[in-house]
Amino acid sequence: MNSSIIDTRPTRKDLDIHDVPAGDMAGQLGNPRVQNTIMLGSFIKKTGLISPESFLKGLKQILGEKKRSAMEINRKAFAAGYELQI
């Protein structure tokens, strides 16, 4: 969960909750709009659902050449979330 904006932890015992300070991390990267990409990086690392390379390849296809600057900040955000120790 985004611990930058959520103070109260869920009380359910059937969930595996991980605190990701995505808002704070996005602020450090200089762009609050990349919080979701940070969360995705953390999720992909924890679950192994897809490889980081697959995610970044897909992101590049979605953003295309017109949004090259968005690709770089999102790559950094993904890496920050992926490298987070949770």
Image: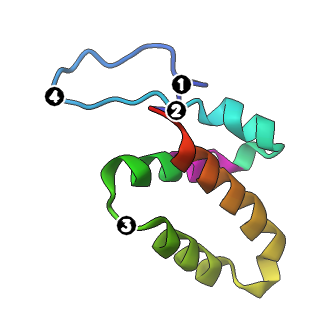
Read off the residue under disc 1.
3
Label 4 amino acid? Answer: Asp
Q: Residue at x 71, y 49 (%)?
A: 33
Read off the residue under disc 2.
20
What's the magenta region?
Answer: 34-39
How packed is label 2: few (under 14 Cα within 10 Å), some, or many (20 or more)? many
How packed is label 3: few (under 14 Cα within 10 Å), some, or many (20 or more)? few
Read off the residue under disc 3.
50
Label 2 amino acid? Answer: Val
76 w.r.t. 5: above or below: below
Read off the residue under disc 4.
14
Sequence-earlier tag: 4 or 2: 4
How far apart in space, not on screen, are marks 1 and 4 (Cα)? 19 Å
Q: Residue at x 43, y 13 (%)?
A: 8
15 w.r.t. 80: above or below: above
Percent x, y of residue 48: 33, 57
Which quadrant of the rendered structure holds the N terminus?
A: top left
